[in-house]
Amino acid sequence: MRRPCTSVKPCSIVRSAPIRCTPSGPAGSDTHPEASHTGRRALRRRDDETTPPAGTRRMRVAIAPQGASLLANALTPLRDFPDFRALWWSTLYASSAWWAQNVVLAWLAFDLTGSELAVAAAAAAGFAPMLLGPLGGLLADRIHRPRLLIGAQSLALGAGAAIALLVTLDRAEYWHVLVAAWLVGMSMAPLMPTRFTLTIDVVGERRVSSANAVNAVGMLGSRMVVPAVAGALIATFGADVALWFSAAWYIPASWPLLRIRDERGGHAAAPGAALGEIVQGFRFALANRALRSLLVVTVLANTFAWPVILGFLPVFAEEVFEVGPAGLGLIVGVNGLGALLGALGIASLGDFRRKGMLYLLATTLFGLALTAFAVSGVFALALVLIFIAGTGSAGFGVMQSTVTMLLAPPDSRGRVLGVLMLSIGVLPGAMLVQGTVASLVGVAVTTAASGVLLGALTLMVTASSPELRKAG
């Protein structure tokens, strides 16, 4: 019998990281047991060779591995899982298409009608299919997931190409914009639950938090860059070129999916059985106390916070801070940067306990930061606060899907995520209500009150739901 190594020798460079010799690598590592003697000799040799002769060198060597370790943790899913790499590139391209289409369709709606209400209606048409989330979740559980993603993206590509052709031929009307926005929204109904479930399929439960955060980094990066490019194309070449540009992103979004295998295969269900399976997803989501609390917080955030981010920032730039389009770009960009860095920070954490608690704290921060932003009165301070709100929104978004997937049974994850999408479906109605209230009392008062309500109600859920606090 091989005698286990029990020696513990502190590292002479990073004092807080002892090196322990074990006969084999940790669970999930690639270390082979037959290499254990070689590994021990390498550890002893590295310990001797890296002892620094001077304090200056000691400090320089100690700091570098810590920063490198954080970056390595953040990039682990991309580095270690080829299928996730392919899915990440697909998500990046599809997200770029979605952001570009949103910008161009909104501009086209206003250009054709001159009505702010028409723009809001087009946005609502794009979000309305979220209410079909349970059906999209069922498809994610029953159909070959990479093929389902390709099919959904093809629908969005077709809708984008059709409206681009109509604009090119100078035949576009406002109702065409509504139909195109609705079809793109329809593609999102299966896209979101399918991407999330496929993510946990390829990386496993231990890495799903980091993987979701890395996905968010890609989506947020495209949000910061692509809309500006689409706007520049509209100004320089016209809406038709911008629409072709936005639709074209769906083509490379499908290529990487061809290499991903879905070991489950896929099978169809009879209509009656399909309805029963959707109901089963609802029953599980509502019977699980942690999931029920998570859905409540999701509804709260999409009622009080996201209408501000998606609809009120131009009003703040023009009427509250009086900084014009350039200031609006700063507000949106700084908010996106906060979300991007927040997602990257979560990715660097790797696997950790109490993910539900992070979800609750991030949502509370999101709401309170929006309140402070609304009452700040000073543009420079407002930029700091909208950055903090972006960080909170990243924690909310990443942990929302992560905790949902970890709580749901593996064979029902798509349907439970579909229920989550249904909760997000309150957003179009909330935007209309918030807009009406803002027209009566002002955007700053509406935002401040909304942020306080979100923060206070989320704290109430935190206090009353130990199950969600401990989840994940």
Image (cartoon, rainbow, N blue to C red):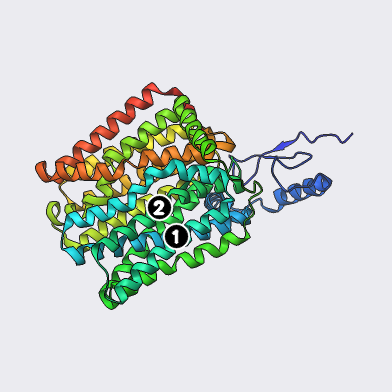
Q: Nearer the viewer, residue 55 or 295?
A: 295
- Judged left or right of residue 337, residue 37 is right
Tag count:
2
Residue 148's spot in the image, x, y percent? Answer: 53, 53
Q: List the residue tagged with mark 2.
A: 186
Measured as percent of width and height from the top left, residue 441 is found at: 10, 41
Q: Position of residue 357 (x, y in %)?
A: 43, 32
Q: Earlier in the sequence, mark 2 or mark 1?
A: 1
Q: What is the secondary structure assignment of the residue under circle 2?
A: helix
Q: Examine the rendering and report whether any part of residue 61 can be seen.
A: no
Q: Residue at x 22, y 59 (%)?
A: 328
Amino acid type at mark 2 = Met
Residue 287 vs 418, above or below: the answer is above
Q: Amino acid at mark 1?
A: Leu
Badge 1 density bin: few <14, some 14–19, many ≥20, Cα 10 Å: some
**Seen in the image, is 390 located left or right of residue 446?**
right
Would residue 153 be seen by someone viewing this image from the given angle? yes
Question: From mark 2 to mark 1, how far is it between C-alphas?
Answer: 8 Å
Q: Residue 464 has which mark?
A: none
Bin the neighbour count of mark 2 within 10 Å (Cα to Cα): few under 14, some 14-19, many 20 and up.
many
The quarter holding residue 411 reads top right
Q: Position of residue 281 (x, y in %)?
A: 49, 33
Q: Which residue is mark 1?
A: 155
The quarter of the rendered structure image containing the N terminus is: top right
